[in-house]
Image: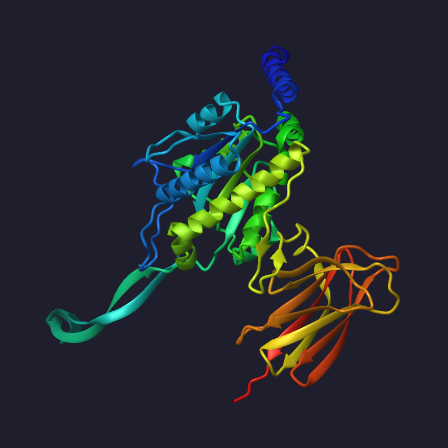
Amino acid sequence: MIRKKVPFLILIAALHLLILNNLFSQTPKYIKTIVVDAGHGGSKDPGAIGQYENSLRSQEKDVTLAISLKLVAELRKQLPGVNIVPTRTTDIYQDPREKARIANEAKGDLFLCIHADSGPLKQGRRQIGTRTVTRHKITYTGKGKKKKKIRTSYEVEEPVYEYFKLPLTRSGTSVWIFAAHKTSDKLKAIMDGDENFEIETGGVDSVENSLDFKTPEGRTIAAIYAKRYQERSDRLATMVNEEIEATGRPALGVNQRQKGIWVLQATNMPAILIETGFINNPDDEKYINSEKGQQELASAITEAVKRYKAQVENTNYTPPTKTDITGKKITATPADFEKREIKDAKTIMVNNSTVKIDLYDDGEIDNDIVSVYFNKSLIFDKKPLTASAQSFNIELVPGKTNELVLYADNLGNIPPNTALMVITDGTERHEVRLSADLKNNASIRFELKNKN
């Protein structure tokens, strides 16, 4: 038994030595090369296909190529000193091992893999008419040897149905990294409790590893990988998720596969996979097929890469100014914004769609600093609360609950972070006291009164 184990142990030891050696010899100080992979490709591997009734019948391989080409162009424009390497620029099939080889031979410092999501579709049916069918009734006469079977024909009308595939209700963009075995709560909620749902179902591009992480050698390799690249992959993925969220699109968080995706585990660099949208959701399919949607995704990913590069290289970088619908500057939502619970929530009925907000420190002035979001758009960022009002107007969207969230950027000198909000609704005035801390946000929900 011992003689049989020795070659295997030597193999594992050699593998660990190789990985550790690469860790110290190939970890980049600067981001010099970025590899962009368009998932799937060629007639052999179209990936997910729009199959619900009245879908665009788009194929994932075409969507990923279009987004990837825009991403390559945007990265080259924004980072002219960086070598941007696409794995494919045309509709060709590449084995996932080939994709990893291209990335590793290019000595990539980042690997960005573009995909489109899907999931199992449920079947619907509807009646489209009727048809006349002949049926037969069997009766008997007589008894014993004289018993006879009588077959009587008659006609009935029966419904005619057609069957079709229902579209997915799931939508949004998610980001994936290798290992650690967890999925964000947000994506679990999007899955509607469907235990059979699995991201990236099928497709040759999703070749999975057979490494058992429950074994000692599996745990060791996973631990080494985590020290090498997982933290950096997670950091980049978080930035991509933040930039996606800043566009107003549903961002489904950073997630990790129970089983690894080959192109993430076999690339010798931080690697992320972006599921840009659900190809079998009508809104998502239109978005990821549109020029506007594709460019918006490419720009958001590029912005995240620029932030990551600046952080890794310890260089100064000022994100470009973005404005929300009010014309005010916005930034990406903090990573923990939605992780904080709403502890202090209030609801106010108002008469007017335009409401004025005056925000003060409540009680003693103690250097409270807050950010305020309205319907997830940043109204102002990291403003100190004083005895003078921070004032702004909000425009309520009819027919929905509009939410203003107070996010505490610090606890001030006297925790928690407290604010007095004066709400002017035409001639009516409301005073609301809010309290937030580093684990909980405060919220006010505005509902327009029905004037009918």
Q: Is residue 115 above or below residue 124?
A: above
Residue 315 percent location from the top left of the image: 67, 34
Q: Is residue 391 above or below residue 334?
A: below
Left or right of 87? Residue 324 is right
Residue 331 or 327: which is nearer the viewer?
A: 327
Q: Quadrant of residue 28?
A: top right
Q: Residue at x 63, y 53 (%)?
A: 333
Residue 438 percent location from the top left of the image: 77, 55
The number of callouts visible is 0
Q: Quadrant of residue 1?
A: top right
Residue 79 seen in the figure: yes
Left or right of 340? Residue 169 is left
Residue 243 or 445: which is nearer the viewer?
A: 243
Residue 231 seen in the figure: no
Q: How is the image coloured?
A: rainbow
Left or right of 132? Residue 225 is right
Residue 93 percent location from the top left of the image: 34, 32
Q: Residue at x 54, y 44 (%)?
A: 175
Residue 77 percent location from the top left of the image: 48, 37
Q: Residue furthest top?
A: 3
Q: Residue furthest bottom?
A: 452
Q: Residue at x 67, y 52 (%)?
A: 334
Residue 260 or 298: which is nearer the viewer?
A: 298
